[in-house]
Image: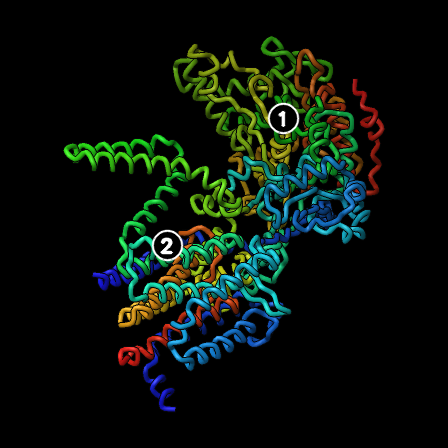
């Protein structure tokens, strides 16, 4: 009997052995989580931040560079015998802040590094870098932020700042980590994937006390940071600086394009802010100040402000009507102010009848009223209502071909499309009630429902300068990896209007400058400028001053749109600014800049 | 020299080979546990534990040879004096020893340190065997049971008093030996039941969950024995005893165990409760073993041990090194070697005609079994962290030499079993 108890005891031995084998099998072979846990214990990834790509102007001048800043990191377990008060004085924080920060770091990990203080500038850094060895447990991590060579172009360049939770959630490929910098607006945002480069990672092994013990797997998984691609913008720094100077104290926008390429030479949104304010440690403070400014410096007017185009739109109307065949360059209409008001009575007495060039030169409202009626009312349907719909939609198609009514696709975020009404639009607006030409005629002269953004006006000017086509306006002419702009910017877009008709428009715009009323402010010696004024009604506030121009007439080098809010007649502020910029760009240092004091004074009444 | 020729032929070489494999595998892993990338020193250097363990192995071999060359009868003759000597040493330790890790168990003479509690295991086994093999011994008789309790209990209580409850628990294994010798299984069953009640008392949060099943079982017992009033009384008494025990556990737990011992048990029940504090050892030990995978990270390549995440790597947690670097296959080699050794020793014990040798043999098997089970069980989170070494594996001279003595006395007795028969 007792001998069988020996078997029971042996049985217990075997059962325990089997239990251990099963338990070990499940721990070691079936469950992978311990492998990860073991790796997490020892591996600490150290991030090497890449050098963000630079931004140059079209002549190779640096507009945006990087400057070194430092993040102060802490490893709580290594803090030993430090003079806290001295440390706080050097870093510039209070002892309470110090304690909160250390506590927070400890809550994360005693042995892993936590961020202690962000964005220490080089000057602050130099104050205590020599003393850093007195404070074991604190490490400096170099990073870079943006620095700006010139205080210009803020809205177009954009800014970078720490990534938001929303952006992190949207980053499905998990490129970004919390604390990374990301382009938030302007080129920084649009070219983020080119500029950002590739983060480097070094996997270090640390023992239980946080002491470094070499590279994980001999650095097999380590990567070096790859600098971002630099971009060369189309901006002419000198012109940009001058344009911003002219717009100082005013609201509005300037867009200057090189017609032969679609490259934006200058883009001004006024008022603006100094780009350096949104870089570095004071970002949050400065950002709030700028954001709360009632003049909205962050509102990028050239892309976002939709205005009624005013009389400059008459050139579009002329081109569309000629192409459609409802008028010829020789068609005359009487200046019948019973149809629509006309404010150019002095040079253009009531009752005269003009051909197209004259009508444009004198900005004759009744002429374009009748052009539009011919366009809209083509008598293809018996019902005047149905007829108007067909005519309007035909017109709408032409106008859209000029790049109006939808975003052009510039390489900046936030571009608006404006509005070119079609039959559906009026059906909605009239809520089912019938409408016909007599209800909508004010669109004929660029008033009414038409809305365009300044970049579209400049693009249209470039289209006229090119006699019929445009390249989408863009701000980057070369990305350093290819040396080319993005492919969509090298494709010609045709308007569908014959270049012969454009010659008529060019002739008219040249006449505007030569002998129109008051537009002489854009006239230049030795350079034939072609332009058109607009004075956009803005009751009860002062009118907006609008001017589009290109020069020289043959082989144009620059096409420009200027929109100055509440500055009265287009022939004054906008024309003068256009003239100055064209002269500055084409003549460089030999420009006489006659109207500069007039513009800088800023009194256009 | 005929006697020694005969001895060599009579020796159980299977046990010696298993013993040898375990010791060699052990020292190899001690080297891995203490291995430091930054300062590679020779395997045999006495500056680290592996080198010292080599020295202890040398001493162990000499001790083994000495034991084998002694007259086997001396163990029977000197059983009580040996026991007494170690009891006295335990008392001496309590008076003179310095406290290490909350326990006063080390005796220091110059640079030589040793732990008498390790040696009391074989001494108690000898005394127990001697007493049980008495001609007029009768298991279950009150007087005999009292003396047995004295032999086993004295060292156990002294060791608890030293603050080393883990080592004291080993003495509970003698119950298994007495069970083999015919003792009623009730103490064994009671022990297991008590352990279960103890765990339930700590695990169950609402007393109702414990009360109700007990009430149901007692109720059913009464119903099925409704005609037997004696049994009804017995069942009710057991019911009350169980409930009473359940409720006294909380008190016992807090008053009898030291805070660190309480923590170890609580952590076993829920290691995630305090992963950086009391749960650290278990968590890191499981991570080490679990990360080994099927075939391990490779010799000297374990990160958990190399970078000091596992505590007591070369002593109590030596199994982590095997688990991490040799994987499941390496762990299985250890499990199989130990189980083979345990079964072999049981078989050796069974083939003894002399009760003294058989009881001693079972003592050896159960003591090794306890160490093996508790040590590996704690590293894989099945037992609370009880600081006892893995026999032959863990670094430590006292441990290695005492286990060597334990095993080789049995081999000496076994080698001479035919002579004993001839008497």
Dot 1, how many residues are within 10 Å of its Cα: few (below 14), some (14-19), or many (20+)?
many
Q: Please indicate, yes or no, whether residue B249 appears anywhere in the rendered image.
A: yes
Q: Nearer the viewer, residue A286 or A588?
A: A286
Vertical placement of residue A334 versus A465, above or below: above
- Residue on which disc 1 sits: A305
Dot 2, how many residues are within 10 Å of its Cα: few (below 14), some (14-19), or many (20+)?
few
Residue B404: quadrant of the picture: bottom left
Vertical placement of residue B265 versus B124, above or below: above
Residue A5 location (% of width, % of height): 25, 60
How many discs appear?
A: 2
Q: Could you tell me which quadrant the N terminus of chain A lies in? A: bottom left
The residue most toward the left is: B227
Colour theme: rainbow
Q: Chain of mark 2?
A: B
Q: Residue at x 37, y 58 (%)?
A: B148
Q: Nearer the viewer, residue A279 or A510?
A: A279
Dot 2: what SS? helix
- Residue on which disc 2 sits: B146
Using residue B148 as the reference point, say whether residue A350 is left or right of it.
right
Q: Could you tell me which quadrant the C terminus of chain A lies in? A: top right
The residue most toward the bottom is: B1
Asked whether the residues under marks 1 and 2 belong to the same chain, the reply is no
Residue A157 location (% of width, % of height): 67, 39
């Amino acid at each position: 009997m007792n001998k069988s108890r020996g078997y029971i005891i042996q049985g217990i031995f075997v059962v325990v052995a089997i239990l251990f084998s099963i338990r070990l099998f499940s721990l070691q072979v079936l469950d992978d989580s311990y492998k990860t846990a073991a790796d997490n214990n020892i591996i600490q990834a150290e991030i090497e931040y890449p050098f963000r790509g630079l931004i140059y102007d079209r002549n190779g001048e640096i507009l945006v560079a990087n400057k070194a800043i430092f993040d102060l990191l802490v490893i709580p377990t290594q803090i030993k015998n430090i003079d806290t008060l001295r440390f706080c004085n050097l870093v510039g924080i209070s002892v309470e802040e110090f304690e909160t920060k250390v506590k927070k770091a400890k809550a994360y990990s005693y042995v892993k590094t936590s961020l202690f203080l962000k964005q220490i500038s080089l000057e602050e850094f130099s104050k205590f870098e020599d003393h850093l060895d007195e404070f074991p447990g604190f490490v400096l991590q170099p990073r870079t932020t943006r620095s700006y060579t010139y205080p210009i172009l803020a809205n177009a360049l954009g800014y970078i700042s720490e990534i938001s939770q929303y952006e992190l959630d949207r980053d499905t490929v998990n490129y970004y980590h919390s604390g990374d910098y990301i382009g938030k607006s302007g080129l920084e945002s649009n070219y983020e994937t080119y500029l950002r480069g590739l983060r480097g990672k070094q996997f270090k092994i640390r023992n239980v006390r946080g002491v470094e013990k070499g590279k994980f797997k001999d650095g097999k998984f380590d990567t070096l940071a790859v600098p971002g691609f630099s971009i060369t913008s189309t901006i002419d720094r000198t012109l940009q600086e001058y344009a911003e100077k002219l717009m100082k104290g005013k609201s509005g926008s300037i867009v200057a394009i090189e017609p032969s390429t679609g490259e934006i030479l200058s883009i001004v949104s006024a008022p603006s802010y100094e780009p350096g304010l949104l870089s570095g440690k004071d970002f949050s403070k400065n950002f709030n100040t700028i954001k709360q400014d009632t003049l909205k410096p962050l509102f990028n007017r050239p892309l976002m402000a939709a205005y009624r185009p005013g009389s400059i739109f008459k050139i579009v109307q002329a081109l569309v009507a000629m192409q459609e065949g409802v008028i010829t360059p020789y068609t005359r209409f009487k200046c019948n102010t019973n149809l629509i008001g006309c404010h150019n009575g002095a040079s253009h007495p009531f009752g005269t009848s003009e051909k197209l060039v004259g009508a444009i030169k004198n900005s004759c409202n009744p002429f374009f009223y009748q052009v539009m009626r011919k366009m809209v009312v083509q008598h293809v349907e018996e019902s005047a209502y149905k007829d108007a719909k067909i005519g309007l939609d035909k017109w709408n198609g032409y106008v859209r071909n000029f790049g109006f009514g939808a975003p052009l696709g510039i390489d900046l975020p936030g571009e608006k499309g404006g509005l070119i009404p079609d039959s559906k639009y009026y059906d909605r607006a009239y809520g089912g009630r019938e409408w016909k030409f007599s209800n909508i005629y004010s669109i004929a002269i660029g008033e009414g429902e038409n809305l365009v953004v300044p970049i579209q006006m400049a693009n249209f000017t470039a289209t006229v300068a090119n006699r019929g086509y445009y390249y989408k306006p863009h701000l980057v002419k070369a990305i350093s990896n290819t040396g080319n702009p993005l492919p969509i910017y090298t494709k010609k877009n045709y308007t569908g209007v014959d270049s012969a008709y454009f010659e008529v428009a060019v002739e008219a715009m040249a006449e505007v400058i030569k002998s129109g009323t008051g537009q002489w402010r854009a006239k230049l010696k030795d350079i034939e400028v072609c332009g058109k004024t607009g004075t956009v009604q803005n009751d009860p506030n002062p009118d907006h001053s609008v001017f589009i121009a290109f020069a020289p007439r043959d082989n144009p080098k620059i096409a420009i749109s200027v929109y100055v809010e509440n500055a009265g007649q287009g022939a004054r502020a906008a024309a003068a600014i256009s003239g100055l910029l064209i002269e500055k760009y084409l003549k460089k240092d030999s420009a006489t800049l006659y109207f500069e004091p007039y513009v800088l004074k800023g009194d256009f009444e | 020299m005929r006697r020694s020729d005969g001895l060599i032929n009579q020796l159980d070489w299977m046990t010696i080979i298993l013993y040898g494999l375990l010791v060699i595998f052990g020292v190899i892993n001690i080297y891995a546990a203490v291995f430091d990338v930054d300062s590679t020193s020779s395997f045999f250097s006495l500056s680290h534990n592996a080198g010292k363990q080599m020295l202890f192995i040398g001493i162990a071999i000499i001790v083994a040879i000495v034991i084998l060359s002694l007259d086997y009868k001396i163990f029977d003759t000197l059983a009580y004096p040996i026991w007494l000597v170690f009891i006295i040493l335990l008392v001496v330790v309590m008076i003179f020893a310095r406290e290490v890790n909350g326990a006063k168990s080390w005796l220091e003479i110059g640079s030589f340190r040793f732990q008498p509690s390790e040696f009391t295991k074989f001494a108690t086994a000898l005394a127990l065997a001697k007493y049980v093999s008495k001609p007029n011994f009768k298991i279950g008789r009150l007087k005999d049971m009292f003396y047995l309790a004295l032999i086993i209990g004295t060292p156990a209580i002294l060791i608890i008093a030293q603050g080393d409850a883990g080592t004291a628990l080993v003495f509970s294994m003698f119950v298994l030996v007495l069970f083999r010798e015919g003792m009623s299984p009730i103490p064994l069953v009671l022990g297991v039941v008590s352990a279960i009640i103890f765990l339930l008392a700590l695990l169950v949060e609402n007393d109702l969950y414990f009360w109700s099943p007990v009430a149901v079982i007692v109720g059913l017992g009464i119903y099925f024995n409704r005609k037997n009033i004696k049994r009804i009384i017995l069942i009710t008494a057991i019911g009350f005893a169980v409930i009473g025990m359940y409720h006294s556990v909380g008190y016992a737990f807090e008053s009898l165990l030291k805070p660190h011992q309480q923590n170890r048990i609580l952590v076993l029940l829920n290691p995630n409760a305090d992963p950086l504090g009391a749960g650290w050892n278990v968590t890191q030990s499981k991570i080490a073993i679990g990360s080994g995978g099927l075939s391990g990270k490779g010799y000297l390549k374990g990160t958990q041990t190399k970078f000091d995440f596992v505590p007591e790597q070369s002593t109590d947690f030596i199994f982590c090194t095997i688990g991490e670097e040799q994987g499941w296959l390496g762990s299985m080699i250890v499990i199989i070697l130990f189980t083979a050794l345990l079964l072999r020793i049981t078989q050796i014990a069974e083939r003894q005609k002399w009760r003294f040798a058989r009881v001693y043999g079972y003592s050896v098997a159960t003591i090794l079994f306890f160490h093996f089970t508790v040590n590996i069980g704690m590293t894989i989170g099945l037992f609370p962290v009880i600081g006892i070494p893995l026999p032959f594996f863990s670094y430590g001279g006292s441990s290695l030499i005492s286990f060597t003595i334990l095993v080789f006395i049995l081999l000496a007795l076994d080698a001479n079993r035919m002579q004993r028969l001839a008497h």
